[in-house]
Image (cartoon, rainbow, N blue to C red):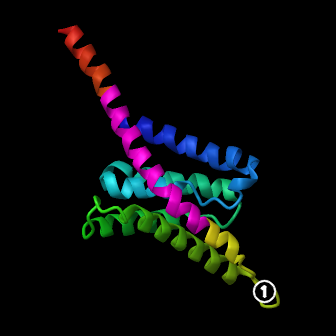
Amino acid sequence: MRYCFYIITLLFLIIVQTVILPCFSLFNQFYDLMIPFIIFFGMFRPVRECAAFVILAGLVMDSLSGGYFGLYISIYAWLFFIVKWAVKFLQLQHGAILPLALTTGVLMENFILFVAITMSASSDNTVFSDLSVFVAQLVWAVFTGPFLIIGLNRIYCMWVQFVDGIFIKKDEYNR
């Protein structure tokens, strides 16, 4: 049943990012909503349980973005494994870890996208990166990211309790 939560959350975040956020001009410079989801996986879930969903999230975003295929898969996989590695050394209870993880994720994604765009540009075209969009994404990540990750973790815990409660009651009823 945990996998149902992952699928529902993945679809919800994709719908919010591709359909709802573009309707509001305030959110034009919002960061990729998959980043908190991937960081949630890296911080709170084991690798064997969620590695396939990290690849699936990247595959879906690669399909929707229209960019280079495999770009988001590689971004999400690198981000996931970096967070898994960093969790071994950092204390999750520290308040600065979540904003740091989100800003690192946004920085990493923007850097990889910038490198991919720069490498694909022809020599006579100059690549202009709008710094205000980048700064806005970092500000959004610092102030909203921790709430998204904590919210995902709490909703996940409630989901597990709800599903376990349903199946435990069924088992007790059958006895």
- Please state which of residues 11 and 154 is positioned toward the viewer in this rendering: 154
Residue at the image position 63 percent from the left and 64 percent from the top: 69
Task: Give residue 67's position: percent from left, percent from top.
Answer: 69, 65
Please give left or right for residue 160 compared with residue 152 in the image. left
Q: Residue at x 43, y 35 (%)?
A: 4
Quadrant of res 117: bottom right
Q: Does residue 71 show up?
A: no
Residue 89 in the image: x percent, y percent? 25, 70
Rendered location of residue 70, percent (x, y)? 57, 65
Residue, far bottom = 123
Q: Is residue 148 above or below residue 110?
A: above
Q: Is residue 113 above or below residue 48?
A: below
Check disc 1 and report its element: helix, strand or loop: loop
Report the magenta residues as a range. 137-162
Residue, disc 1:
126
Q: Residue 50: image x %, image y %?
A: 38, 50
Q: Assign the magenta stretch its main secondary structure.
A: helix
Q: Amino acid at mark 1?
A: Thr
The quadrant where residue 122 appears: bottom right
Q: Residue at 68% x, 49% y: name it.
A: 21
Disc tally is 1
Placement of the C terminus among the 4 image quadrants? top left
Residue 100 within the segment the image draws in magenta: no
Are there few (<14), some (14-19), or many (20+) residues within 10 Å of tag 1?
few
Q: Is residue 144 magenta?
A: yes
Image quarter in which the N terminus is found: top left
